[in-house]
Image (cartoon, rainbow, N blue to C red):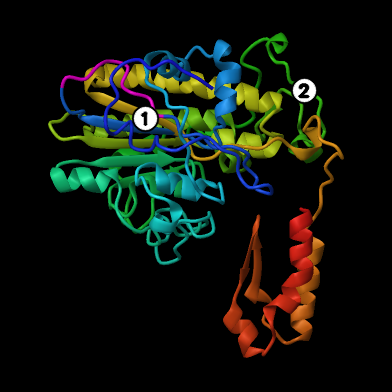
Amino acid sequence: MKFRVAGRLTPVAAAHTTGQIRSMPKFATILAVLTLAAAPLRAQTSQPTLVVMITIDGFAERNLEKFLPQMKGGLARLVNGGAWFTNAHQDHGITETAPGHATLLAGRFPRSTGISANRAGVYDPESPLVGFSGGLGASPKRFQGTTLTDWLVSKDPRSRALSVSSKDRAAILPIGRSKQQVYWYAADGEMTTSRYYSDTVATWVSQFNARSIPARATGKTWSLLLSPSEYAEPDSVPLEGNGNDFVFPHLLPPDTTATETIFWTYPVGDELLAAFALEGVQAMNLGKGPQTDVLAVSFSANDAVSHRFGPDSREAHDQLLRVDRTIGMFLDSLFKLRDPSKISIALSGDHGFGTMPELAKGLNPAPTRVSILPALVSARQRMAKLHVDTTALELDVQVVYVDRDAFAKAKVNPDDVLRPLSIVMRIY
């Protein structure tokens, strides 16, 4: 993947562009990861007053090149007007949201940030959510070290940051432990934060939530952005969505509560996030200078759509075109609010996606999907017979977690229990 270089690259935009594109380990979910950084669309004559970190969750670089001719919005503008780095990657073995976002503005590997997986991310029962009792508490207490926000504040205490996302970990981790304004989407249709940051949400957040945007989407339809002839992907693949609702158009539930719960997993979730970020820029006076402020926006719908329908689906194609338009509208609005020549923009994905095994072409023999759950159930049954606490073994996607102290207390070698499970994991 090659792009020409245009414009002036700032040190901020170049922060995470060293390294090389390479394949992940054989059994990793993600096949390739690429970090992309874009310089400002106009040359700067002084230090920026606003640094904008845009992240597309689950953004595989191959899709940018594949669908670029159909892009008319923000991604197209950044490709055509920015400096793009193709010899770049985020180097983390478990390519998930948390380690990727922790790396973005820290410039360090997961071994240094302390965030190696989603599981070891932001869950913190001591930091409950504000105004929402149904969600898990969250904070950056596991994050180690500093980020760009800390460096800017150490230089000028007037520097401020706003970080927003549909996911708690994607909102929290880009700015590390800094107690700035950090918000994410709650399942009740509102943007919230945790008590790590504040006991209440800001007034502008309450006013935004009062607009009830997710609730007003109840029963609305997600239809194709372009004519069906513009999509090469078939719209009749039962593997997508586990065989449920895998054909366009897709309807949001007729029930308001259900719609609010899943709203962020549709393209409209990104539109909500862009509007919220712009509201925050205005309310917080971000980017007015003379100090440098930070705005981190992580769009999550692409990840949800790719998990549900697969990264090579018509839905993933349409979602990418829609986030391109959403980012375009976001940039247009931001440049009306602030001087573009004083804004630095960086764009990245936190991880990519691999093709569904059953849909991969040219594999011989054809892949077979294997379930790990029967082996996990068997392992726990054996633990119970050996009087080992069955909670001492947990499985989180591709990682097995073992409480060795619990096994030692029962005088049992954990390898005797894990061996059958490890065989299935290798097959998987």
- The one nearer the camera, 272 or 217, is 272
Q: Crowding near pointer 2: few (<14 within 10 Å), some, many (20+)?
A: some
- The one nearer the camera, 410 or 32, is 32
Q: Going by the image, does 237 lie left or right of 345? A: right
Relative vertical location of residue 382 with respect to residue 245 in this rendering, above or below: below
Q: Is residue 173 magenta?
A: no
Marked residue nearer the N-terminal end (2 or 1): 2
Percent x, y of residue 167: 49, 45
Percent x, y of residue 387: 72, 87
Percent x, y of residue 160: 22, 41
User: What stretch of residues is rendered in magenta?
Assistant: 37-45
Judged from the image, the secondary structure of the residue bearing numbered disc 1 is strand
Q: Which residue is mark 2?
A: 235
Residue at the spot x=44%, y=57% of the render? 111
Q: Amino acid at mark 1?
A: Ala
User: Most prominent secondary structure in the magenta stretch?
Assistant: loop
Relative vertical location of residue 31 with respect to residue 79 in this rendering, above or below: below
Q: Quadrant of residue 283?
A: top left
Residue at the spot x=14%, y=44% of the render? 155
> In the image as oriented, which residue stretches furthest toward the right?
365
Whether residue 171 can be seen here: no
Q: Are marks 2 and 1 in contact (CB under 8 Å)?
A: no
Q: Amino acid at mark 2?
A: Asp
Q: Quadrant of residue 276?
A: top left
Percent x, y of residue 380: 75, 74
Q: Is residue 38 magenta?
A: yes
Residue at the spot x=53%, y=14% of the render? 71
Q: CA distance from mark 2 to mark 1?
A: 34 Å
Q: Which residue is mark 1?
A: 346
Residue at the spot x=56%, y=40% of the render? 260
Q: Quadrant of the N terminus?
A: top right
Q: Going by the image, does 46 lie left or right of 20? A: left
